[in-house]
Amino acid sequence: MAESVYKIVELVGSSPNSWEEAAKNAVETAGKSLQELRIAEVSELDMKLEDGKVAAFRARVKVSFKYLGKE
């Protein structure tokens, strides 16, 4: 097995509908600019409140991607 190095970044996705959609939004948006995404780990869930009501679901997601150095 070849040696590999991975970078981990933390993202926050949001959705008016669910935590699952919030996490998906974070990963799919990251995938537009990051290559070789490998693992996504939801590390925290919270909600944005407005006037005592849930306005948005938020998911903090750690995403890893393969570091592509010069070969």
Image (cartoon, helix red, strand yellow):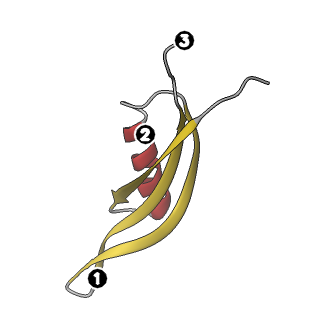
How many residues crowd mark 2 within 10 Å: few (<14), some (14–19), many (20+)?
few
Q: CA distance from mark 2 to mark 1?
A: 27 Å
Q: Which mark is residue 28?
A: 2
Q: Is residue 46 left or right of residue 36?
A: left
- Furthest toward the bottom, the residue is 52
| Element class at badge 3 | loop
Tell me the element at label 2.
helix
19 is higher (above) or lower (below) than 34:
below
Q: In whole angstroms, how far apart are the C-alphas of marks 2 and 3?
A: 28 Å
Count how many numbered circles sit on residues in the image.
Answer: 3
- Who comes first in sequence, dot 2 or dot 3? 2
Image point (40%, 48%), residue name: 25
Q: Quadrant of residue 2?
A: top right
Using the image as rendered, state which of residue 68 and residue 35 is in the foreground.
Answer: 68
- Residue underneath mark 1: 53
Q: Residue at x 57, y 37 (%)?
A: 6
Residue drawn 80% across and 24% down?
1
Q: Amino acid at mark 2?
A: Glu
